[in-house]
């Protein structure tokens, strides 16, 4: 009687080979995704981008030290009790801001905000510290307004430590130091106000004030300063297409495209920024081309954004755009931009996107 051969050894022998094939497939897929992203980032050169001066430096573009900024941002937002020794590598200014964040999170708003302001005064050009102050104030004001709505308070009044903040602080800081960084944060503070109070009679003058400040930065000594270009481009992009804006007569339909496209060109020149930042810029350039009436170019930029970053929220936003019918694209984009402005948990003025 012949015994039937046991197949188990053969199956076991094939398992390592199958594992190798699977790893090879995943490796190839990973390479393809990276290649697509690289191709997309290189492809922007044929899509009407401005030239970048060969003498431009990362510092002049506002793109120097992004990794250090990310590290600092992570450190100051880490939970720190008042009796905990600070991180050794942080400056005195950063320690004050870190302590201020912790105090504010623990309900000691007056002390926390004053600590943060003291730290920023020591390093007025530090975008990470200033951004943290704006975000803390934004959250406190947002939460106060939400509570007022729940309690049906018709005319809520901010407490003294939040009244006219962060605009008042950055106005004073800019008067004392007057740098591109202080002016940028003052401009972003006006956008913060616009996001919290979206009524047109508030939104329009806030946007105009912000753009005027950003134009003052860009138009004089810092024409390639990416943070200001990005902020001004977003301002133009988010203005309602079917309303007459206070300065619409002197603003080109391609104003958003010019500023955002220049950010892309400079970022490409230095190969700077995360995949998310690069994809966000490409997405915004595409949206700008919708506002400019050039839908085919908009589709090309959305495709570039899709290839650059695979994060689910970005992919979903891009798929929504591709689903829009030609005749409805502008109206649907306006709805999309309205939604993005209303997402106050992650306001569009949060500069952490630059270094994260």
Image (spheres, rainbow, N blue to C red):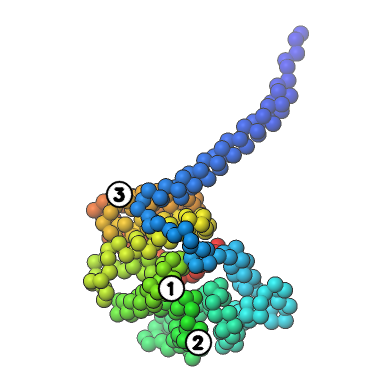
> Pointer 1 and pointer 3: residues touching (CB < 8 Å)?
no
Q: Position of residue 188 (x, y in %)?
A: 44, 75
How far is disc 3 from disc 2 in space, using C-alphas? 47 Å
Circle 1 sits in a helix, a strand or a loop, which is it? loop
> Pointer 1 and pointer 2: residues touching (CB < 8 Å)?
no
How far is disc 1 from disc 2 in space, using C-alphas? 19 Å
> In the rendered image, which quarter contains the C terminus?
bottom right
How far is disc 1 from disc 3 in space, using C-alphas? 35 Å
* Sequence-first disc among 1 and 2: 2
> In the rendered image, which quarter contains the N terminus?
top right
**Residue, disc 1:** 221
341 relative to 23 in the view: left or right: left
Total labels: the figure holds: 3
Instruction: Name the residue at 30% across, 80% down.
Output: 201
Using the image, determine if residue 52 lies above or below residue 214. Answer: above
Q: Position of residue 53 (x, y in %)?
A: 44, 60
Instruction: Name the residue at 73% across, 24% down.
Output: 9
Using the image, determine if residue 20 lies above or below residue 224. Answer: above
**Residue, disc 2:** 176
For residue 343, which quarter of the picture? bottom left
Q: Residues within 10 Å of mark 1 (few under 14, many from 20)?
A: few
**Marker disc for residue 296:** 3
Instruction: Name the residue at 70% across, 72% down.
Output: 89
Q: Residues within 10 Å of mark 2 (few under 14, many from 20)?
A: few
């Amino acid at each position: 009687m012949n015994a039937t051969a046991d197949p188990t050894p053969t199956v076991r022998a094939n398992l390592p080979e199958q594992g190798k094939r699977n790893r090879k497939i995943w490796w190839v897929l990973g390479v393809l995704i990276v290649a697509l992203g690289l191709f997309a980032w290189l492809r922007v050169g044929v899509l009407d981008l401005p030239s970048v001066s060969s003498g431009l430096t990362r510092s002049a573009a506002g793109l120097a030290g992004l990794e250090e900024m990310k590290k600092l941002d992570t450190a100051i937002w880490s939970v720190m009790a008042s009796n905990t020794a600070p991180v050794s590598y942080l400056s005195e200014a950063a320690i004050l801001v870190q302590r201020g964040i912790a105090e504010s999170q623990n309900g000691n708003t007056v002390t926390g905000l004053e600590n943060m302001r003291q730290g920023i005064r020591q390093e007025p050009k530090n975008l990470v510290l200033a951004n943290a102050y704006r975000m803390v104030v934004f959250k406190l004001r947002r939460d106060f307004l939400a509570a007022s709505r729940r309690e049906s308070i018709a005319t809520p009044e901010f407490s003294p430590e939040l009244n006219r903040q962060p605009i008042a602080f950055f106005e004073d800081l800019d008067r004392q130091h007057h740098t591109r960084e202080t002016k940028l944060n003052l401009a972003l503070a006006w956008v913060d106000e616009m996001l919290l109070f979206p009524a047109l009679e508030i939104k329009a003058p806030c946007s105009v004030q912000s753009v005027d400040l950003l134009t003052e930065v860009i138009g004089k000594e810092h024409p390639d300063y990416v943070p200001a270009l990005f902020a001004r481009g977003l301002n133009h992009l988010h203005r309602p297409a079917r309303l007459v804006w206070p300065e619409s007569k002197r603003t080109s339909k391609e104003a958003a495209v010019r500023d955002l496209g220049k950010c892309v060109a400079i970022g490409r020149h230095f190969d700077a920024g995360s995949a998310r930042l690069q994809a966000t810029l490409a997405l915004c350039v595409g949206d700008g081309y919708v506002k400019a009436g050039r839908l085919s170019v908009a589709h090309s930029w959305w495709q570039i954004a899709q290839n650059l970053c695979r994060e689910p929220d970005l992919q979903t936003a891009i798929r929504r755009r591709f689903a829009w019918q030609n005749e409805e694209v502008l109206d649907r984009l306006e709805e999309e931009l309205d939604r993005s402005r209303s997402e106050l948990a992650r306001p569009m003025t949060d500069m952490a996107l630059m270094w994260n």
